[in-house]
Image: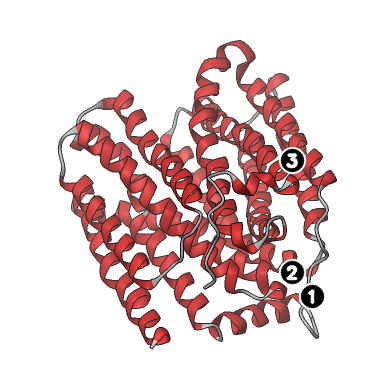
Amino acid sequence: MNDLKTTGAFSALRYPDYFWFWSSYFVSNVGSWMQSIAMGWLLFELTASPLYLGLFSSLRMVMLLSFFIIGGILSDRIDRRRAMLWIQFIAAGTSLILALLVSTHAIQVWHIFVLGAVTSTTWAFEQPVRQALLPQLVPRDVLVNALALNAVTWNGAGLLGPSLVGISVGTIGIDGCFYVNVVSYLAVVAALIRLRVPANVQEPGRGTVVQSLLGGFRYVRGEPVIFTFLVVSAIFNIFGRSYVTLLPVFAKDVLHVGASGFGFLAAGPGLGTIFGSLTLASLGRVEAKRWLMVSMLVAFAVVLCGFAVGRNFSIAVALLVVIGALSTVFETLLSTSIQLRVEESFRGRVSGFYGLTGGGLREFGGMQAGFVAEWSSAPTAIVAGALVLAVVGYMFLGARLKRRAS
């Protein structure tokens, strides 16, 4: 892999197309977080049932799993900028309908489920298209920096968006949060209109959608390093990121800190993500070497075990910050390695596969952790997942890449 030039923590922002794209998405993600928090609160107000919250989360998972790969195929077949514009219009329209239903007191539970399904579907289409578009906005030598800064747009907004809901909902109401999200989508539309990106490189002999999907599978299987990174990403998200689902259990039953403590626990990984992203962006010159990836994977598993067995609240929060930082750096290096190796004509489909291993399988990981915790305990579930991650992850990442290097 080519060395990456050291050009500063925010070097990718020197490129106008990336700057407008990045800043507009930060605004949009703040609005998306506000809507996500407001929808959960609204659903609980209408039903007073945690079961409906679980069903809503399951619905979103199904939508993500169903459409990530289709979004990747779409990204390789049509103009990515135009696809992004249509996605923003559909998402903004969905938020506007939701806001109007709340404002007119016509909102019902089924409205939230239907509109939530549409929102999740648009997000599943958007992610692979956006990931495939990013390498077209910056030179290869600042791609690590660009992807690291891209992580800040979601996780930084994840700290700001929920806070804005708490501060402003008393003034603007739940419907006001949805209206804010509508406006935030317009920021992305404005940025996309001014972008100038080259046309997609089409796969030779492109056929039907099914043929494109099968071609994507064949390409990944024929690229051992990309296949290895995708498998590791799946393992990492199933067994390494499942701790997020069990944080309420730790807050209530393990650390005994209640709802206020849960807020700090939930914020810890997000804060760590920002630290990790900015640190990686500032380094600039980083290669995804085998020893580095294996070391980070093992370090993540060790810190995760430390969090699971600990009983001190302050130490638990600190460890979650470290966990968030390590996971962000690890996943950014995985993503960058894939983006630097993939052929342009397959970039969208591979981005769809990568999105599936992240957004989709992460929810599946939460499900398996919940089952194990119900059968044993939350600390046992996390420790078991960390051990599986370390052993199986090393088998793929360490041994397979070593054979490729030899």
Which mark, residue 188? 3
Colouring convention used in this rendered image of the protein: secondary structure
Spatial CA span between label 3 and label 2: 21 Å
- Mark 1–mark 2 CB contact (< 8 Å): yes
Specify whether 126 is left or right of 371: right
Amino acid on which the number 2 mark rests in the picture: Asp
Q: Quadrant of residue 405?
A: bottom left
Q: Does 230 sit above or below residue 283?
A: below
Amino acid on which the number 1 mark rests in the picture: Gln
Task: Label 2, secondary structure: give it.
Answer: helix
Spatial CA span between label 1 and label 2: 7 Å
- The reply to whether residue 77 is visible in this rendering is yes
Residue 19: give x, y in percent of width and height: 69, 43
Task: Label 3, secondary structure: give it.
Answer: helix
* Earlier sequence position, callout 1 versus callout 3: 3
- Seen at 48% across and 78% down, the residue is 225
Q: Quadrant of the C terminus?
A: bottom left
Residue 1: give x, y in percent of width and height: 52, 73
* Earlier sequence position, callout 1 versus callout 2: 2
- Seen at 56% across and 60% down, the residue is 355
Q: Which residue in the structure is indicated by mark 1? A: 202
Task: Label 1, secondary structure: give it.
Answer: loop
Residue 370: give x, y in percent of width and height: 32, 51
Label 3 neighbour load within 10 Å: few <14, some 14-19, many 20+: many
Label 1 neighbour load within 10 Å: few <14, some 14-19, many 20+: few
User: Observer-nearest residue: 333 or 244?
Assistant: 333
Q: Quadrant of residue 102?
A: top right
- Seen at 71% across and 55% down, the residue is 137
Specify whether 163 is left or right of 90: left
Q: Quadrant of residue 240?
A: bottom left
* Earlier sequence position, callout 3 versus callout 2: 2
Q: Does 171 sit above or below residue 247?
A: above
